[in-house]
Image (spheres, rainbow, N blue to C red):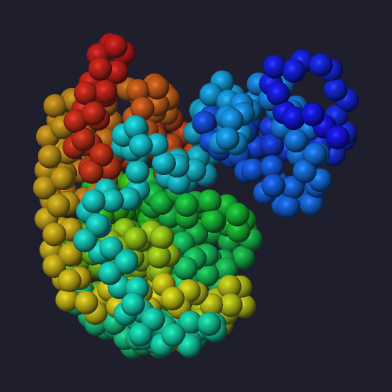
Amino acid sequence: MNAPLDPSDSRPRRPAPIAEGLARLIGEQIAEGVYRPGDKLPSLRELAQLHRYAKNTVVVAFEILVARGLVVPRRGAGFYVSPQAQSRKGQDEEAGQLSRAMDIVWLMREQLRTQPDAVAAGDGFPPVEWLADMRMDRYQQRVTRTGLGALFRYGSRFGYRPLRDSLVRKLGDVGISAAPGQFVLTHGANEAMDLVIRYFLQPGAVALVDDPGYYPLFGKLKLAGVQMVGVPRLADGPDMAALEASLHRHKPRLFFTQSIAHNPTGSDLAPAKAYKLLQLAERHNLMIVENDPLADFKPTAAVRLAALDQLERVIYLGSFSKSFSAALRVGFIACGGALASDLADLKALVHVSSSEYSERMVDVMLREGHYARHLVRLRQRLEQATAQALQVLDGLGAEVFTRPASSLYLWCRFPGQDDSLALAQGLMEEKVMMAPGRVFSVDSNARSPWSRCNVGAVIEPRFEARVAAYLERAE
């Protein structure tokens, strides 16, 4: 029988292979950051039951970990990860960041990371406090009252019908007339894009995209083997001469664009360009995929292609990730009825269904009178933050691509910084996480002086102080 665990006992032992294997497993978990310095490890009894080992085997494994300096015992309290134990998790992520910065998924990884001490200047989401008045816990009981039994089964291929009814009213407010059968609810706007790509585009097909534009879309198109052709984005919308030339040359089936609150430039489509774009679409048999993730942040009178076209040649995508919560993952496609039925069938084949629980949650939130007040506050906050952010950027000497009255994003270049990737690398050391322009380019290797800045982060005092200090040292 093994002697009691004693860290001062340095007598050599020949641990059993099973104990050595368990020690290696726990050591790897410590190295990967699953257990961090100071964390309490599971008890000997818990590990013995979990792995179906004898308790003495677990004791020997802990002896090995103590001898290696990874674990320290505390009398009567159990075993803890040593304060000196090193995790390679953070080291690996940091080491790979700079080389990944040219990759499409680099910024997606950054969006999913949480760094409390960092200024997320390149973040794609509004500050959490802007959304706090739509806390989901307020609506949980109402969701279950809408039909608890149905929550244990798959829902309709189109999605939860009452939410589609609510979307009829919501889109009607922005001038888009649609029936419930013209909506397909999705797992966020990104699934909506996936379905459209699968339905329309075969490998080798050509699709037009905003350039700069929405980088996750670029990744999806590349994954599908689709050839992307960028249409330069100007301060008032697409470069129409370049668009028309691409239509003649490539004869694409789809053009993916954002009319308002464009990501990353923050620009809005001018009415004259909107009409001309629809005329070109008719002439060249082009379908337009209009992504509108920030619809709730903009006035209802803002120019939308779907409102002018009434879903004839426009497929309209929406989401509640920015205005409610990204955790809900509820989006939608609005389009012609026949196409909606086909896309619903494709959704059922690929994903079976979307989350009816989340869809019920969104529907309850939309029907709650608090929603209208939430939108008013949201738009006021965004307008104030945009004005303040422009002042901060002006004070830093930055050039701003366009100066909207309200936008979650501002596209800017900083003085003396010709490569925003190098800027992002430098500011990373200052705990300022930027979104370099080349990530948003069709050619991700192209050098860009531009960066996307989130106005909610720009107005944090730490942003101005840290960027100013960096620019001063770089002179």
For residue 13, side relative to residue 329 (left or right): right
Q: Residue at x 76, y 39 (%)?
A: 58
- Residue 87, position as x, y percentages in the image: 58, 28
Q: Quadrant of residue 287?
A: bottom left
For residue 345, side relative to residue 266 (left or right): right
Q: What quarter of the picture does the N terminus occupy?
A: top right
Note whether residue 182 is visible.
Answer: no
For residue 271, side relative to residue 430 (left or right): left
Q: Residue at x 61, y 34 (%)?
A: 79
For the residue pair 231 and 414, the one nearer the viewer reads as 414
Q: Quadrant of residue 120?
A: top left
- Residue 240, position as x, y percentages in the image: 31, 55
- Residue 373, position as x, y percentages in the image: 13, 67
Q: Quadrant of residue 469?
A: top left
For residue 74, side relative to residue 116 (left or right): right
Q: Residue at x 49, y 66 (%)?
A: 191
In the rendered view, tell whether residue 398 sits above or below residue 335.
above
For the residue pair 9 and 273, the one nearer the viewer reads as 9
In the rendered view, tell whether residue 403 sits above or below residue 304.
above
Q: Residue at x 40, y 76 (%)?
A: 359
